[in-house]
Each structure stands twice: as C-alpha cells, then as structure tokens.
C-alpha cells in the first residue's frame, strides 16, 4: 500500500468517525449539528472550550452534583436554559475537535459522560417548561412514555428540593407519592385525546389548554402530599376532551368522515353564537352536499378560493332561499365568507 492509499484510508476513517460522533450527539439533543470542518488548531479549540465554560459559569454552577445542578435549573427561564444547552453542546464539540486533532491531554479535561448527564438534566427542565407553555403542541409530537418521563423527572427534582421534615412520609421514589399513578394515567389519557382531536385550534380546545398550562405551573408550588385536587382538575379536562372528540366524530359521520366540514361547522358555531346550532348544521349540510356533488371538486379547489366560492354559492343559494335558511341566518352578509372558510378547511384536511 503506497502513501496515497494510506491517506485515502485515513480520510475515510476520519469521515466514518465524524458520522458516528454526529449520530451519537444528535441522539442526545434536539439541536442538530454537524462536525464537518471541525479539525482546527488545539490552541484555538482550547480557547473556544474555555469561552463556553466561562459563559456557562455566569449562568449556572456546573461543579456541583447532579441533584444540586437540577435544583438550580428550576430557578432559570427557558432562554437561559437554552443558552446553557448551547454551551454544553459546544463543549461536547470541543472534545471531539481535540480528539480529531490528536490533542489527547486537552481532550481529557472534558468529562464527556458528565457533560451528557448535565445536558440530560437541562433538556428535562426545558421539556417540562414546554409542557407548561404549549402542552398540546408537545403532547402531539411526543410519545406517552416521553410525557410520563417528563413528569417523572419533574417530580424527582421537586422531591429533592423539598424539606423532608414537612412530608407525611419519606419518599423512596417518585412512585411513592400518593396520587402519582392517577396523575400520570390522567396525563397519558389526556394526551391520547389530544392526538385523537383533529382541530386543536378550536376555541374549546384552546380553553382546555389554558387550564392544562395552569395545572402544570401549579405543580411547581403544590404540596406533593395532596395531588387529589390536581388529579380532579385533570380528570375534568379529560372528560371535556372526550366529549369534544365524541361530538366531532358524530359530526364527521354526518359529513362522510370529512373533517373539513367538522371544522367548518365548529368555526361557524363559534363565530355566530346568535344563531341556532342546528340551523348552522343544516347550512353546513347544504355546502357539503354541493361540494360532494360537484364532479372534480378537488380540481375546483386547485382553481382557487374565488372560483370555489362562486361555484358553490351559485349551486346552493336557491336551495337556501327555499328552505328559509338564507333569510333566517342573514346569509347575504356572510355566506361568501363561510364558503371561503370551507375552501380553506378543505385544503387543510
């Protein structure tokens, strides 16, 4: 094997190593990064490492044990936590750069396992804050197991902060908390209903999300000896979500399983509470029947909103006049807007 072959083999090995390191690091963080172009001088890498460490030291003390580190994170806002996560990821990158530069002594100053553990604690806290600010968005994208893990990690840190003398019993583990299982069962069932719902932007769902936010925020301050009140609130939210989903599925059956018209009906009920709901349902029936009867309705949608509105309006106005709905619902003022919303919903669903 000549020198050229050796060089090619070395480059191939470095490329495979970089890919392996990228995959490993990206599995531990939701911030994607690339290791391409990282091989620079050890002195420059060392300066960068110390800059990351110095900046992070202004935000949090990383020299303490994991329990105390996690307790510090509870006092920090999301932006600060994101900054700490960036610094920790930067330090991980520096260790990789040291290794690629064969600066083993400098690489040894970074404890990779410790950095990963700190990152995990930071991510746990970020996940919980996401649960308090955008619970529905988070529950839509993560699994049941991940939601339970977020809650578990929160309770674990909370127990470590509490004055144990104030507790009615000593907790050996989070699962020892009275009501914990009922709490996690309620949260996972709520998540299932959120995923079952196809219109999370509806007014009723938004109202329930506001209640969820308040509950998760309250967890920061409540006495863990008494989760019964919180569990009662969660079960009420779960009951309301199930009722909403059952109503949506009933409506979906009315409109041939087309959730575009479920949303159209739900929206028009919210926008026009002055009218009878059944009259609004009949209006939606007429629009649905007209769209269903139009040959090539998908092509009509592609032609644009104005074409869709004009065609459906022309095909339905006479029927609405004869049924009395046109006058009863004062459709001359908002029928075109209603059909415009129907068009938008059909594009979404």
Image (tube, rainbow, N blue to C red):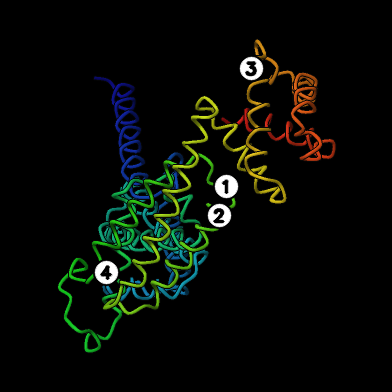
Q: CA distance from mark 4 to mark 2?
A: 29 Å
**Residue behind mark 4:** 156
Helix, strand or loop at mark 2: helix
First in sequence, mark 4 or 2: give its number: 4
**Residue behind mark 3:** 298
- x and y, in percent, of residue 65 in the image: 26, 73
Q: CA distance from mark 3 to mark 4?
A: 52 Å
- x and y, in percent, of residue 111 in the image: 27, 61
The answer to whether 76 is drawn above or below residue 187 in the figure is: below
First in sequence, mark 2 or 3: give its number: 2
Could you tell me if the residues under marks 4 and 2 are in contact, i.e. CB atoms within 8 Å?
no
Q: Is residue 311 visible?
A: yes
Q: CA distance from mark 2 to mark 1?
A: 6 Å
- Nearest the camera: 69 or 125? 125
Could you tell me if the residues under marks 3 and 1 are in contact, i.e. CB atoms within 8 Å?
no
First in sequence, mark 3 or 4: give its number: 4
Question: Does 277 sit left or right of 166 as displayed?
Answer: right
**Residue behind mark 2:** 206
Q: CA distance from mark 2 to mark 3?
A: 30 Å
Q: Is residue 109 visible?
A: no
Helix, strand or loop at mark 4: helix
First in sequence, mark 3 or 1: give its number: 1
**Residue behind mark 1:** 201
Helix, strand or loop at mark 1: loop
- Seen as rendered, the residue at the extreme top is 295
Identified at 27% across, 86% down, the residue is: 163
- x and y, in percent, of residue 299 in the image: 67, 14
Question: Does 332 sit left or right of 286 as displayed?
Answer: right
Question: Does 66 sit left or right of 212 as displayed?
Answer: left
């Amino acid at each position: 094997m000549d020198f050229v072959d050796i060089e090619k083999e070395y480059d191939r090995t470095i490329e495979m190593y970089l890919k392996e390191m990228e995959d490993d690091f990206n599995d531990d963080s939701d911030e994607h990064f690339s290791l391409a172009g990282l091989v620079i001088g050890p002195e420059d890498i060392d300066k960068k490492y110390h800059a990351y460490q110095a900046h992070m030291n202004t935000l949090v003390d990383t020299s303490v044990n994991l329990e105390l580190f996690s307790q510090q994170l509870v006092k920090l806002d999301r932006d600060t936590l994101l900054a700490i996560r960036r610094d920790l990821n930067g330090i991980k990158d520096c260790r990789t750069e040291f290794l690629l530069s064969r600066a083993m002594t400098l690489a040894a100053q970074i404890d990779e396992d410790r950095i990963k553990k700190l990152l995990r604690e930071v991510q746990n806290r970020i996940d919980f804050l996401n649960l308090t600010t955008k619970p529905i968005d988070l529950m839509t994208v993560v699994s049941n197991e991940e939601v339970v893990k977020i809650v578990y990690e929160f309770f674990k840190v909370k127990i470590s902060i509490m004055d144990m003398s104030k507790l009615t019993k000593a907790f050996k583990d989070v699962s020892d908390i009275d009501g914990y299982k009922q709490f996690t069962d309620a949260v996972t069932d709520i998540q299932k209903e959120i995923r079952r719902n196809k219109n999370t932007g509806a007014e009723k769902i938004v109202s329930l999300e506001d209640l969820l936010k308040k509950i998760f925020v309250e967890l920061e301050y409540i006495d863990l000896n008494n989760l019964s009140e919180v569990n009662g609130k969660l079960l009420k939210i779960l009951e309301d979500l199930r009722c909403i989903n059952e109503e949506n599925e009933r409506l979906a059956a009315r409109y041939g399983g087309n959730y575009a018209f479920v949303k159209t009906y739900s929206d028009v009920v919210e926008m026009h509470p002055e009218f009878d709901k059944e009259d609004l349902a009949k209006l939606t029936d007429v629009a649905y029947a007209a769209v269903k009867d139009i040959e090539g309705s998908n092509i009509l949608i592609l032609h644009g909103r104005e074409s869709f509105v004009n065609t459906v309006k022309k095909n339905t106005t006479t029927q609405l006049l004869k049924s009395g709905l046109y006058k009863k619902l004062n459709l001359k003022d908002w029928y075109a807007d209603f059909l415009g919303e129907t068009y938008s919903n059909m594009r979404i669903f």
